[in-house]
Image: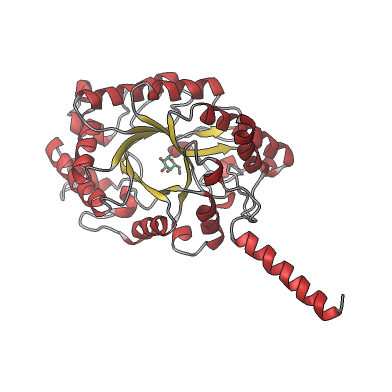
Amino acid sequence: MKLYKLKIYTTLCMVLLLTAVSNGGSDAQPTLKNVFAEHFLIGGALNRDLVSGKDPNAAAIAIRHFNTATAENDMKWSRIHPKPNEYNWEPADRFVEFCEKHSIVPIGHCLIWHAQCPSWVYRDDDKNLLNREALLYRMREHIMTVVGRYRGRVKGWDVVNEALKSDGTVRYSRWKRIISEGNEEKQYDFIAKAFEYAHEADPDAELYYNDYSLDTEKEKCDGAVKIVEYLKSKGLRIDGVGIQLHGGLDYPSPESLEYSIKALAATGVKVMVTELDIRTQASGYRGADISRVRRRGTEDANDVSLEIQQKLADKYAELFSVFVKNQQDISRVTFWGVYDATSWITGSPLLFDSHYQPKPAFDAVIKVVENSK
Ligand code: GLA
């Protein structure tokens, strides 16, 4: 080959390689949304950089592989409604627009949660705690405004997030304390009100309850079943329960995961896996309680080793086998993030590495479908 031809050939190869990388993978690489098209929707939590164009390689992965997405942070109360009369719509609007542009089903996350909610929400101008009526008024205003803005565009909302303790009863929070007026018999009251208002704001939107450790703690899962039953007994709409599934290399077991899917599905609602990731670090706190996660404390230089990545692949394969087996009850599987570098738990918990490349875990997940045929 003449030198100039060799140069053209080399340049062409480079262009093809770069195009493949910026596409989130080569064209020969299977896409998650196609592979699971007959099973459930598949998606990820999208951050602000991704939807605003600052992280185009992450956007390419989302566009190529996902048909659903959740806003990682920008629809949480502290972000979208930081001050009493101030809403910050920009980032959430970008998220919804990104999804619409790329035929991705957008999920709203989350309306009522004890965390990432500013302290002014619970107090009046003199800093005194609100009473039940005033807090309900504030809750309704927030839900009507946020859900109302995206009416007909956001398919479903995590209406209440993480209301349960491990024993299946409702955890202490300002929401519970003030709205139940300290009466345990009214522990579900704030949850019911949130679902009532969300339905009023968008009668066509699906409404979900979302929590962690439902896949590992039987009593907590049974507590979520009770919430569904309570809401139904009051004639309120609830369409699904989200199992967050922040897992680890050795949990949840297939048995406890399957227990939770079947127990929740038996109430007649959809089950969705809403925040899937697998903690690879061997040290530090390894559970899913956001208030206990210390990023530095969970750093572990070994977590990108081949051995750990193989364990990660095996665990993902095991979990996806359970999802596929129970596909009639599962409507959606959403990863909590897109690629390792931006995960909230650092480490190496996702299918794409910090350089946007698919890992052995990606291939293992794809193979689950091939093996199930
Ligand atoms: C919880 C929340 C998510 C997210 C994760 C950690 O699971 O539901 O919104 O904050 O914690 O980032």
- Which image quarter: residue 140? top left
- As displayed, is residue 46 above or below residue 56? above
Q: Where is residue 357 in the image (x, y as percent from the top left)?
A: 64, 52
Which image quarter is the N terminus in? Answer: bottom right
**Outermost residue toward the right?**
1
Residue 132 appears left or right of 306: left
Ligand 1, seen in the image, is in the quarter at top left
Look at 24% across and 25% down and name the residue there. 232
- As displayed, is residue 353 above or below residue 20? above
Q: Where is residue 45 in the image (x, y as percent from the top left)?
A: 46, 48
Q: Does residue 155 appear anywhere in the picture?
A: yes
Q: Between 119 and 65, which is closer to the camera in this rendering?
A: 65
Q: Between 177 and 40, which is closer to the camera in this rendering?
A: 40
Look at 47% across and 26% down and name the residue there. 215
Q: Between 39 and 94, which is closer to the camera in this rendering?
A: 39
Which image quarter is the C terminus in? Answer: top right
Q: Does residue 282 appear anywhere in the picture?
A: no
Q: Position of residue 135 (x, y in %)?
A: 17, 41
- As displayed, is residue 341 above or below residue 112? below
**Outermost residue toward the left?**
133
Residue 32 appears left or right of 91: right
| Applied colour scheme | secondary structure
Q: Position of residue 349 (x, y in %)?
A: 58, 42
Residue 246 appears left or right of 15: left
